[in-house]
Amino acid sequence: MAVVAELGETVSKLRQAYESSRTRSLAWRQAQLRGLLRLLKEQQETAFEALHEDLGKHRAEAYRDEVGLLMKSANEALRQLGKWMTPEKVWVPLVAFPATGQIVPEPLGVILIFACWNVPLGLSLEPLIGAIAAGNAVALKPSELSPCTAKFLAENVGKYMDAAAVKVVQGGPEVGEQLMEHRWDKVLFTGSPRVGRAVMAAASKHLTPVALELGGKCPCIFDMMSSARELQIAVNRIVGAKWSCCAGQACLAIDYLLVEERYLPVLLKVLKSTMKRFFSDADAMARIVSARHFERLRNLLKDREVAPSILHGGSMDAENLYIEPTILLNPPLDSAIMTEEIFGPLLPIITLKKIEDSIAFVRAMPKPLALYAFTGDAKLRRRIVEETSSGSVTFNDAVVQYAIDALPFGGVGQSGSGQYHGKYSFEMFSHKKAVMKRGYLIELTLRYPPWNERKIALMRHLYRFDYFGFVLCFLGLRR
Amino acid sequence: MAAAAAEQLRESFSTGRTRPAAWREAQLRGVLRMATEMETEICDALHADLAKPRTESYVQEISQVKSSCKFALKNLKKWMKPQKVSAGVLTFPSTARIAAEPLGVVLVISAWNYPFLLSVDPVIGAIAAGNAVVLKPSEIAPATSALLADLLPRFVDGSCIKVAEGGVPETTALLEQKWGKIFYTGNGKVGRIVLSLAAKHLTPVVLELGGKCPVVVDSNVDAHVAAKRIAVGKWGCNNGQACVAPDFIITTNSFAPKLVESLEKVLLKFYGKDPLQSPDLSQIVNSNHFNRLSRLMDEEMVSDKVVFGGQRDELQLKISPTLLLDVPLDSAIMKEEIFGPLLPIITVDKIHESFALINSMTKPLAAYLFTKDSTLQDQFENGISAGATIINDTSIHLTNLHLPFGGVGESGMGAYHGTFSFEAFSHKKAILARCFIGETKARYPPYTPEKLKIVKGVLKGNLLAMIQAISGCPRGA
C-alpha cells in the first residue's frame, strides 16, 4: 500500500514539474544533457563496477556498448538540439493567402521508460537523452535483474540532473504494473514480447501511446567469403557479435547462423580457433544474469532432441552462472532453441543446400530486430533487402548499426514498434503539432453557405490550384 | 470470415504483388477514377446517410480524396527511394541508408461522419506504402458502406484490397486477427478497445479520435469575419458532426454580445429563417445521436441558456444551429464532445483565462484562436497542446497535405495526410553495408588497456584513434 501511494506521489510530482513548464526551455534541456555527461564522466568507475557486479561485463565492453555510446549520444543531442526544436515551415496553398503553415515539435509531457537488464545503463539513458531533449519530464524504471545498475542510477541521476523532473523508480514487476495504472504521455518498453503485450494492454486503458523495443531471433546469413582474410574478419565480427555482446544476451546479438552445407567445415574451423583466441580468458565474456536465465538456457541444451547437436562447448558452471560459448549444428527446427529467442551464448548453425534458401527460411520466422548477412553477392543482398523484413539489415558486420546515430533503431512486427537514436529519439518523445495562421486580408465568400453550382465550380478550380481557370470562372467566362 | 480474409491477403502480399511502384500507381489511379466517375453516386450515398449537402460532399470528401491520390502519385517514387544517410566515421568505410517497406496487411476502420473520406484516405496511404488492406467502413453510414463494397473491387485490385462490411461483431472479429497495422478513426471508448485488442498481437496502431475543440475569440477581431469562419467550420462541416468542428467558444464578457449577434446574422444568411428546411444543413446521423444531443440541450441549468436556435425535427433527424451562453462548466454539454450543431459560448473576464480552462480538459484534436495580438498567438501556440492549433480560422488545415493530421493524448496517436500517410503505413528499415577493408581488432577480446584506449578515442571522434583502429592496432593482440 505504501509503495502504491509513494508511486502515485512520484507520478503526480512529475506531472507538476512538467506543468510548471520548467522542462520546456532549451536551457533546461541542455543543462540536463550536460549533467548526464558529467555523471558518465565522474562516475564512470562506479558504473563499470555496477555493470561488472550485475553481469560480469568487462569494462571494455561496458565502455564500448554503454558508457562510450551514451556520451557520444548526449554530445550529439547537445549539438543538434537547437535544430531539432526549430519548427519546420511548410508550403501553404495560394488560396489560403495570407497564411503560414508550420510543424512545431512539442513535448508529450510525462514519459515512462522501462529498461532491460542486459544493457542496463544504455537502455535507460539512451531513451532518457531523447525524452529530455524533447522537453519532457521522465520516470525511469531500470530492471530489478540488474540491481547494482538500478541503484547506481537511483543514486546519481537525481544528483546530476533536475531531480524534480527526472526520477528513477526501483522495483520489480509489481512496481512496473503499478506504474502502468497511471496515465503517461508515452511509455517506452524494452524487453520481451510477453511483457510488451502486458504493457500495451495496460496502456490501452489510458490511451497511452507505447513504443516497444522487443527481441526476436536475429539471423546471420553466411555466404562464401572470397578469401581467407575476409573469412577471418567475418568470423571475428560474428564471434564478437554473439559472445562479446553480454554473452549473447542482447536483442541485437546474432541468434543463429545459416550457411551452405558444403561450406560448413571451413567456417567451423575458423569459428573454433577465433573463439579460442578471444575467450582464452574467462573474464572476457559476461556471465548469465540470473539463476533463472541460467536454467532456461540449460534447458534449451538439455532438450533430448537438441543435446546431440552440440558441436562445441556446452559446459556450464551454475555457481558462477557461466556457460561456455557453444555451437550447435542443425538442432530440430521445432525445438525451443529454434523457436524462442536464445538470449545466451548458444549458437545454432543451420545448413542449407543453397544460400538463397536462407531467404525463405527467414521469412517463415517472425520479423527480427536485425538481420545480418555476410556476402559479396549483390543479387543476394538486393533480394535480402526486398524480400525479407526486419528492424534493420546489416551487411558484413553485426550489431555496429546500433552506434550510428543517423540510423533509426527499432523493430517491426514481433520485434517491436517505434524507433529511436539520434533525432529519432527526439521525435519519439515529441508531438508534431500542425500550426496554421491566417490573416484577415482576403475573404473568400465562396466557402460559405448558402451553396450553389457556381460556388462548387469555383471550388473545383481552386482545389486543382487552377488559378487561371478560377479567375475565368469567377468572371463568368467559363463554367 | 475475418480470419479467412486476413489469411488470403497475407498470401497475396507475400507474392510481392503490392510492392512495385507500378501496382501502387495503378491502384491510386483506380481510386482517383472512382472518385471522379462516381461523384454522383457518392454524393447520393452521403445524402442518404447524412443528408449531406452536395457541396460538402464534393469539397470535403471527394475533392480531398482526389487531392490525396494526386499527391501520392506525384510523390510516390520519391517516397519509395531509399534515403542515404551519413554512416559517420565509427564504421568507416560503410554506407548507410533508410528504406521504407510496407508493414504487410493492414486494417483500416472508418467512421460514419465522413464515411467516404475517412475510409478512402487512409487506404490511399496504405496502398502508397505497398500494403494489402482490409477496409471496414462504418455501419452507421450504411449507404456509403454498401457503395464502397460495391465500387472498390471495380476500380482496384480486389486480391489485395478488400472491403469488409458489418457491425460490432464483424469489427471485433477483424480486430482479433494479426495485422501489420490498425488505423482507427472514431471515439476514445472504442479506441481503447482497439488498442487493447492490438496489444495481443503487438500490432502498432494509429488512432484518430476526437475531443472538444475550443475556439478562443479575442475582442480585437472583426466579429463578422470570425463568425463566418467559425460558422462554416461548425455547421458547414456535417452540421457539427466532425472531429475538428469547433466544439465551444471562449470569449470575453465584453465581446460576447457582439459575437453572438454576428453569429446570429451569419446563421441567418447561411441557412435562412427556417434552418430545418435548408438543403445546406446535414441531418443528425441517427436517432441515438439525435436523442443524445437533445439530452445535452434539455439538461436542467442548460436549457435556459439557449440564446439562438434550438429547433428540432425528430422525423427528419434535424437540429438547427443552436447557440448557448454560459452553460455551467460541469454540465454534460461541457464535459462530452458535442459532435452536433450546439455551440456553447463561455465568457471570461480576461481572454487569458481561456488557457486555464482549455488546459483543464483533455488535449483536443484542434484548438482555434481568433486574435490579431501576436503575443497572444505565441502564448497560445506554446501553452496549448493539441493535434493542431489554427489561428484566425477553423478546420482548414485538413486540406494542407503538408501538415500532419492527428491527435495527441485523448485525441489520438499517430498522424496522416500527405507524406505522413505513407509513413504511417511503412517501416523505415535501416540498412548498413560494410566491407572488409580495415579490421578493428580493438573491438574484440581479449581486452587490453591499449585496446580500450583506442575504442575510447574512436567513440570520441579522435582521428588518430580511428586510424589506429582501422589499421588493426594494437598489433599482436
Image (spheres, helix red, strand yellow):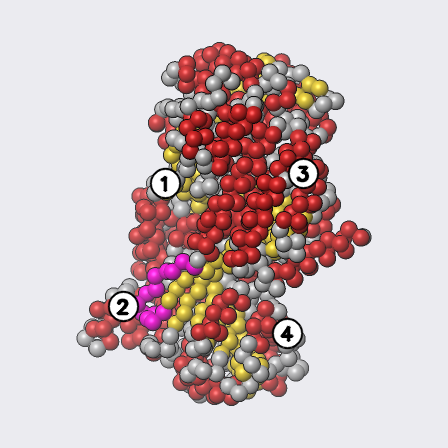
Q: Chain of mark 3?
A: A
Q: Chain of mark 4?
A: B
Can residue A273 be seen? yes
The reply to whether callout 3 and callout 1 are in contact (CB within 8 Å) is no
* Residue that carries the numbered disc 4 in the rendered image: B332
- Mark 3–mark 1 distance (CA, rounded to whole Å): 37 Å
Looking at the rendered structure, the secondary structure element under dot 1 is strand
Question: Residue B139: x and y, percent?
Answer: 51, 60
Question: Residue B55: x and y, percent?
Answer: 36, 72
* Residue that carries the numbered disc 3 in the rendered image: A149
* Vertical order, A388 against B60 (above or below): above
* Vertical order, B39 against B391 (above or below): above
How would you rate the neighbour count of disc 4 (Cα within 10 Å): few for under 14, some for 14-19, many for 20 or more? Answer: some
**Amino acid type at image mark 4:** Ala
Region of the chain picked out in magenta, as a range: A87-99
Lower sequence index among marks 1 and 4: 1
Residue at (45%, 82%) from the top-left corner? Answer: B220
Q: Quadrant of residue B47?
A: bottom left
* Residue that carries the numbered disc 2 in the rendered image: A461
How would you rate the neighbour count of disc 1 (Cα within 10 Å): few for under 14, some for 14-19, many for 20 or more? Answer: some
